[in-house]
Image (tube, rainbow, N blue to C red):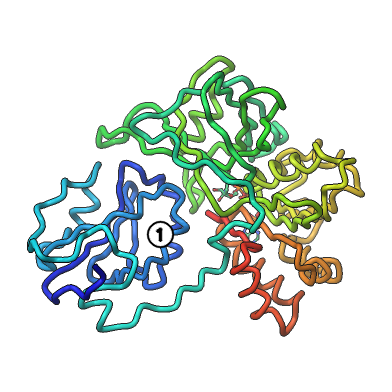
Amino acid sequence: MNAPLPAEMLKQHLIDPEICIRCNTCEETCPVDAITHDGRNYVVDPAICNRCMACVPPCPTGSIDNWRLMLREQAYSLEDQFGWDELPLEKPSPAADMPAAAEPREPQGAAASETQAPVFAAPGSVVPPWSAAHPYVNLYAPKAPVTATVVGNFRVTDTEMGSDVHHIVLDFGKQFFPVLEGQSLGILPPGTDAQGRAHFARQYSIASPRDGERPGYNNLSLTVKRVTEDYEGKPFNGVCSNYLCDLAKGDTVQVIGPFGSSFLMPNHARANLLMICTGTGSAPMRAMTEHCRRRIGQDENGKLMLFFGARTERELPYFGPLMKLPKDFIDINLALSREPDQPKRYVQDAIVERAADVAALLADEDTYIYVCGLKGMEAGVLQALSEVAGPQWDALHAKLREQGRLHLETY
Ligand code: NAP
């Protein structure tokens, strides 16, 4: 089945635009930069992709795992792929005796045999901690979403400050929507884009633990920042964040997912959690912290250490409840970047300041690290961890990655 293809044949790698939630994971993971995107679709360049499979395990939806056997000269171009709202139907196989199209597990074909597939080394783990509970994923797809009802929507940052972050509670009634801390879901905003196409789903991390925002209820929470400007600071209204932040109690929303099978917490007693986040990247940290808080007194929690970056104290989501957590339960370190009369501080600065305690956690085989938030923090946090760990960082980094102990989710 895995015999090399003739040079004129191609097993083309495609992304299903109907299922893709545009989370950017594939583009970030691709070691040869074959994946790119426009305002709508993520696409794979057939001239670059070598079918190394690096992008497949991290994809939360499975939309990445589509392959078409075809003549190389008939490969779908990037322009073709940018125009799709759904994958085109499979064409009849160009040669009846060619290998079946459903087994792209090994690099194949002329491109792959000419150049060896690169060794894949994403900075974070693509496997969960060994003891993580089993996650349910992809129970609801865009064509058959589940309807949830808004039972709470309130602001968790100071009303006088620029960052408008909402805590939104969704109830699923009697419908099955099981989640674990660290998983995410997709929201389908109503309406259409400028081309008249239905909006695609937006992904949000779940901010509540597995037993719900309110234990005993079939509900969960999200942390959503109202987007009012783009990355360059120009006015831009985020389609889904504004829709969600404006929802009222009793409104309904269309939900897909759940997603994610590696950014999960260990499920065995006394594992340590080192959590590093910025802004709304705090959502999964809130879920994990709350899971642990609910079992205080049961001798199950290890050490919890949190590094949380925000512009100011008043723009830090959940500041009040966070500060009320017992000091012997969680070691909280804030890094504020725009607090008047204070030097600018990022989470990576705080990590280095607490080097001795972070080093002790890194030296413990039972420590699991989670990083979530702005894309820009990733390099800085890894650099800070390497400074703290010293010369052994490269070996430790590889071990953490392999053992599902270093999880990065940055956007
Ligand atoms: P933000 O308020 O813009 O920034 C939070 C803090 O991070 C600020 O103090 C900011 O400092 C600082 N920062 C900026 N660049 C940094 C860098 N290179 N290294 C370390 N810190 C840096 O954050 P936000 O708007 O809430 O955005 C959080 C991110 O998390 C978004 O990209 C979002 O997509 C992502 N996310 C959200 C969820 C969710 O469920 N809501 C889940 C996962 C990820 P300055 O701006 O003052 O420089």
Residue 182 versus residue 151 in the image, above or below = below
Provide residue 128's location: percent of width, then percent of height: 59, 57
- Residue 321 left/right relative to 177: right
Provide residue 262's location: percent of width, then percent of height: 56, 54
Q: Which SS class for mark 1?
A: loop
Crowd rating for badge 1 (residues with CA inside 10 Å; few <14, some 14–19, many 20+)? many
Provide residue 25's location: percent of width, then percent of height: 46, 57
| Residue at (71% x, 71% y) in the render | 385
Q: Quadrant of residue 64?
A: bottom left
Q: Label 1 is placed on what type of residue?
A: Val
Provide residue 37's location: percent of width, then percent of height: 34, 56
- Residue 352 left/right relative to 38: right
Q: Quadrant of residue 28?
A: bottom left
- Residue 62 left/right relative to 289: left
For mark 1, what is the residue?
56
Residue 63 versus residue 367 in the image, above or below = above
Asked whether mark 1 lies closer than 8 Å to ligand 1, one says no
| Residue at (70% x, 36% y) in the render | 157
What is the quadrant of the N terminus in the image? bottom left
